[in-house]
Image: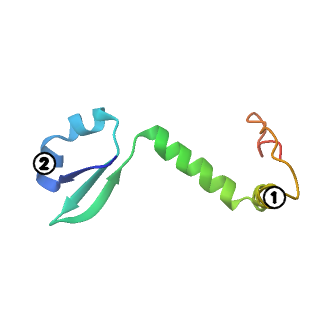
């Protein structure tokens, strides 16, 4: 769930907003201009982008999704997750 704040409220309550650990949208004149994410959400997003940018990883995902190969456990300690 996202919480929307206008610029004035966000500025006045920035510390509280940061401590809340919630996703938030800051708007200016009713137009969204900034998105705030907890660090964990940002890191998960970046990891997803890394996997999507890796051709070998995407090839494995597509092969498993189409039924050509079976899903297998990922090795989270490996740089390429064992793919």
**Circle 2 — which element?**
helix
The residue tagged with tag 1: helix, strand or loop? helix
> In the rendered view, does 55 fall on the left or right side of 10?
right
- Determine which residue is flagged by label 1: 56
Quarter of the rendering containing residue 54: bottom right
Q: Earlier in the sequence, mark 2 or mark 1?
A: 2
Q: Quadrant of residue 72?
A: top right
Residue at x-position 16% and y-position 40%: 13
Kindly identify which numbered label has been placed on residue 4.
none
Q: Residues within 10 Å of mark 1 (few under 14, many from 20)?
A: few
**11 lies left or right of 53:** left
The residue indicated by pointer 2 is 9
Q: Position of residue 47 (x, y in %)?
A: 61, 48
Circle 2/circle 1 CB separation < 8 Å? no
- In the rendered view, does 70 fall on the left or right side of 74? right
The residue drawn where x is 77% and y is 42% is: 81
x and y percent of residue 77 in the render?
Answer: 75, 33
Against 53, residue 47 (above or below) is: above
**Residue, far front:** 67
Q: Residues within 10 Å of mark 2 (few under 14, many from 20)?
A: few
């Amino acid at each position: 769930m996202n919480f929307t704040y206008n610029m004035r409220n966000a500025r006045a309550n920035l510390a509280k907003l940061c401590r809340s650990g919630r996703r938030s949208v800051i708007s200016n004149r009713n137009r969204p201009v900034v998105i705030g994410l907890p660090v964990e959400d940002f890191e998960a997003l970046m990891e997803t982008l890394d996997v999507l940018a890796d051709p070998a990883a995407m090839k494995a995902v597509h092969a498993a999704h189409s039924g050509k190969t079976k899903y297998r456990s990922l090795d989270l300690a490996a740089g390429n997750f064992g793919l």
